[in-house]
Amino acid sequence: MADGAFPDTSRSPDAPNGSGEAFDSGEEPAPDASFVGNLLYRRVPQVLAGYLGVTWTLFELAQWLTDQYLISPYLGRALLFGLLLLLPSVLLITYRHGRPGPDQWVAAERYGVGANVVLAVGLLAFVYGDVELGSMVRTVQTSSAGPAVSEGSRPAAQQVPKRAFRKRIALFYFDETGRAQADTSLRRVAALALRADLEQDAFIDVYEPLRFAQDLREHGYSDGLNVPLGLKREIAQEKNVERLLSGQVASTVDGFRLTTQLHDTKTGELLAERTYEGPRFFALIDRASRTLKKDLDLPEAHRERVPDLPVTQVFTASLDAARAHAEGYHHLADDGAERRRTSLQKYRRAMQVDSTFALSYLQAGALQWTLGLRDSAREALRKAQRHSYRLTETKKHLLRVLRLFRVEGRPQAALQICKRWTSLRPHDLTGWDLQAEIYERLLRSRAAAESYQRVLEIAPGTKSAERGRIEALLTAGQTAEALRQSQSYVQSYPTDAAGRILRGVARWQRGRHRTAKEDFRQAAIGGAPIAHFYLSALHDATGEPTKSRTQARNLVTGNEMETGGLRRLWHHFWLRGQIDRSLQLRDSLRTPVRAEDGPPDQSHVFYAMHTCEYYGPLGRPRLVKTGLQRIRRRLHTVPDSGNVRARLSVGTAQVRCLIHLDRTEAARQALTRLDALVQREGTPYLRMHDQLDVLWGRLQERSGNLQKAIQHYETYLDAYAGRSRALIRTLPLPRLRLARAYHKAGQPDQAASTYQRALEVRPAHPYLNLHYARLLADLDRSQAAQRHVQRALEAWAPAEASFPPKQRARALSKALGNSPT
C-alpha cells in the first residue's frame, strides 16, 4: 500500500480518538487559575456558608430556649463562640478535601485540627468555665419543720432564679425634671413605689435608697436628693450592684411626668431612658416597671408568667398616704431618737389615710418595737398581717420574722424563716441582716459574723455589715481576727471614725493601750463623741487620771453628750475614792430631772442603781435604801405588757439594791421574775445585757454556792464580755467577781489567770490590783503582791484616809512588810 494509503493511528493526549476532539472521561474540568476559582473548585464558600448558617441557627435556637424555657443565655453565646473557634478546622478540611476525588490525610492536617480543638476547648473553659450554662432556675424545698407548720404553710418545692441570673439594681430617689418643679415627697414616693412593684419579680433584687443613706450623708447628701451620677455610680460599685436606677418626676397641669434612667454601673453608660406622662401617678409606675423588665433583658416567657399586680395592690392606692409613708421612711436614715419619733408620726399619718396600707403598718410596727412601744408594735404588726395580701413575698417573710422573733418570742422559729428567705432570695440583704441580728440575740456571735460575711460577699461596700462582723468577732473573743478586720476597715474608710473605735477596742482588749489611745484620739478628731468615753475609760484603766478627767470634760459641752460626760466623771471620782465629789456629781445629775410629785423617770433608775453599786460596799446603807425607794416607785409605773427593756432595767436595779441590803430572798424572787420575763421574750441577749447571770452569781456566792456562782459568771463573760461597749460600762467588773469566787473556792490558779486577763485590759484598776495582791499574798508571793497593792494605793492617793478600800490596801501593804505613806 502506498504511503498515505493508510490512516495515521497515533493519538494526541488531547484527542485520544485521533479526531482532535477531547475524550469524555466523566471528570470535572480543571479549575481556572484564579484564587476565587480555586476556592470554588474546592467548595470552600459553599461549606462555609452552610456552616455559618447552621451556627447561627443553633445560636437562635439557644436564644429561643432562653426566652421560652429559662435556659441560660450564656449557653447560646458559648455555643456560638465554640463553633466560631472551630472555623479554622472547617476551612482546613474543606480546602484539602472539598475538591472532587479521593484524598489522603496528611500529618499536618491531623495536627492542625487537633491543635484547633484543644485551643477551642481551652478558650471555652477559660471564658465560660465558671459561668452557669444550664437552667436559670433551681428547685428549693421551702418546707421546714417548725415555721412551716406554725405559719400554716405546706411543704413544697419552689423554683427560684439562680444567683447568676438575678438582676441587681441600686435605686436612688428621683430628681426634678428640669421643666417642672417636683415636690420632695413625690420624688421619694416614685422610688419607693417603683421598688415595691419591681420587688414582685424574683429575678430582680432592688437595693433601696435607705441602703445608701450613710454613704450619701458622708458626702453631704443627707436628704438623698440631687445626687450626682458619678457619686451614685461610685456607691453602686462599692455594693457590687450591676445597674443603677434613678430618674425625674414632677406634677404637671394634666397629671404627672415620670422619667426613668437605667445606667450600667461599671461604665456609667445610659442603657435606657423612658418618659411617661398621664393623669394617674401609679399607672405611670406600672408602665415604667413593665418596660424596665424588658430593658433588663428578662426572658419573655418569664415576664409573661410572673405575677405582676398593679403597684396599688402591693403599695397603696392613695398618693397622700404614699407621701406620708415616704417621709417616714426617709427619717429612718438617721439613728437619732427624735428623727425616729418623727418617722413614726409620718407612718401613723399614712395609716390614717389608708387603713389597709400593710407596708406602712409593717414598718411602723418594727419602729415602735425599737422605741419600746411594745403594745403599739404588736397592734401594728397584727394589722399588717390582716392586710398581708398587699405585701410582696419579701415583705411577707419580713413580717413573719418580726412576729415570731419580737412578738411571740420564738427566735429559733424566726431564724428558720430567715434561712428560707435567704435561700429563696440570696441577694436580699435585709434577710441576711435580720439573720445576723437574730444570731446576735441568741448569743451565737460566730454565726452572726458569718451572716455579716454573706452580706459582704453580696455587697462588699456595706459598712454596717463590716462593723457588725467586727463587733461579732469581738464578742466571740476572736480579738486577733477582729483586729485584722478592723485594720482593713480603717484602710478602706480612713475618714470613718467608727472603724478607728473598733480597732481601738480590739487593741485595748489585746493589751495594746498606746495604739488604742491613738485610735480613739483620731476618732474623736473625726467627730465621734463616743471616742471621748473610750479615751476617758482607757486613761482610767492605765492610771492616767488627769487625762481621764480631760476627756470626760470634753463631753460636757452643753450638747446631748453632756450628761454622758458627767456620768463618766462621776464614775472616775468614785473609782479614785473621791466619794464626796462623786456624790456631788450624782446629785447635780439627778436634780434637773427630779419629778416634783410623780414617780421618778428612767434616769432616776440609773442613778439609784449606781448609787447602790457604788456606795453600798462602802457602808452607806441610807443611800442604798433611798435608791431602792426610787426604783420601786418607778417599777409600779411600768405595765406588765409595756417596754420589756424598761422593766428589765428597773427590775435589775431593784435586785442590785436588795443584794447590798442583804435581802437575798427578796432579790431571789425578783430575779426569778426577771428570768421568766426573758424566757417569755425568747431573747438570751437581754439576759446578758442586763447581767442577770452576774446577779445570780452574786446571790449564789452569798449563799456559799461558789461553784454555781462561778458557772454564772463564766456564762456571762463567755457571751458578752467581748462587746465593745462592755469596756466602758461603769458597773463593777464581772471578771473581778469571777476571780474572787475562784479565790474563795480554793482554785488559786484559775483565780490568778482570771486576774491577769483582767489586768491586761485594766492594768491600773485599783480594785483589781488590791484583790490580786491578796491572792498573791496567800500564795506567799510577797514581792509581786506588794507591786500590785502599791498600784491600788497610787490610784487611791486622792481618797480620804478613812476610805475603806484604801485602809484595807494600807493594812495589806503593812502586812507584806512595807510602810505605806
Image: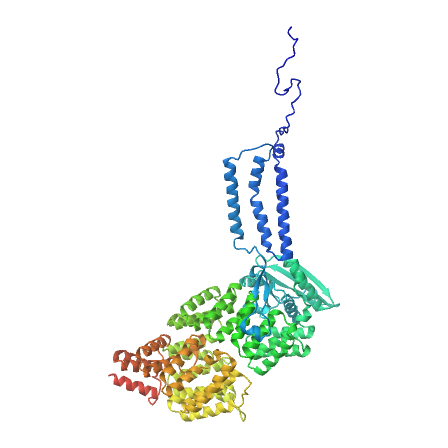
Is 31 on the left or on the right of 612, as rendered?
right
Q: Residue 261: percent from the left, percent from the top?
A: 64, 61
- Residue 609 visible at all: yes
Q: Quadrant of residue 331?
A: bottom right
Residue drawn at point x = 51 percent, y = 63 percent: 457
Depth check: 353 or 426 in front?
426
Residue drawn at point x = 62 percent, y = 44 percent: 52
Depth check: 625 or 62 in front?
62
- Residue 556 visible at all: no
Q: Residue 233: percent from the left, percent from the top?
A: 57, 61
The C terminus lies in quadrant: bottom left
Q: Residue 379: percent from the left, percent from the top?
A: 61, 81
Is 390 on the left or on the right of 625, as rendered?
right
> Where 510 sits versus 98, above or below?
below
Q: Residue 194: percent from the left, percent from the top?
A: 65, 67
**Among all residues in the image, which is located at the extreme left?**
817
Q: How many labels does the image show?
A: 0
